[in-house]
Image (tube, rainbow, N blue to C red):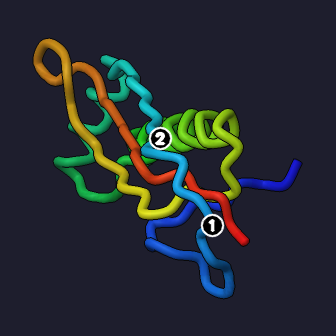
Amino acid sequence: MAEIIITTTDGIDGRQVSQYLGVVSGEAILGANLFRDFFASIRDLVGGRAGSYERVLRDARDQALDALRDEAQARGADAVVAVDIDYEVVGNNGSMLMVSCNGTAVKLR
C-alpha cells in the first residue's frame, strides 16, 4: 500500500482531489515526568534548550500523526490535507501534554 501524504496545505501540487472522505483526527496525551520538570526548571535558570521536553513534544506529535494516518488509511485515503496540529496542557496542574491533529482525508487523481 502506498504511503499516505500528510500536509498542512489544502492541496497537493500536481494532483487533484477526486473525493473528500471527511475529517480525520489523532490525539496523544503524555504525562509529565517529575525529574524532567526539575531539570527543565534548572535549564530555565541557566539558559539553553530543554531537550527532554523537545523529545516529548516530538514523540507526542508523531503519535498523534500516526493515529491520524491510521484513521485516513482505514477510510481509503491517499492523503490528508489542511492538517492542523495543536498542543495543550491538561490535567491537574497541567500535568499532561495533549497533542491533537485534524485534517481532511482525500482520494487523489
Indicate left or right for 45 with 109 as reference: left
Nearer to the camera, 71 or 28: 71
Q: Quadrant of residue 38?
A: top left
What element does badge 2 sit on? strand
Q: In the image, what residue type sits under mark 2? A: Val
- Residue ranking furthest to the left: 93
Q: Give the x, y percent position of residue 16.
A: 63, 77
- Residue ranking furthest to the front: 18
Residue carrying label 2: 24
Q: How many marks on residues?
A: 2
Q: Earlier in the sequence, mark 2 or mark 1?
A: 1
Residue carrying label 1: 18
Residue shown at 56% from the left, 33% from the top: 67
Residue mark closest to the camera, 2 vs 1: 1
Whether residue 9 is situated above or below residue 96 in the rendered picture: below
Q: Tag on residue 88?
A: none
Residue shown at 47% from the left, 43% from the top: 61
Nearer to the camera, 53 or 30: 30
Whether residue 77 is situated above or below residue 34 in the rendered picture: below
Q: Dot 1: few (<14), some (14–19), or many (≥20) neighbours within 10 Å?
A: few
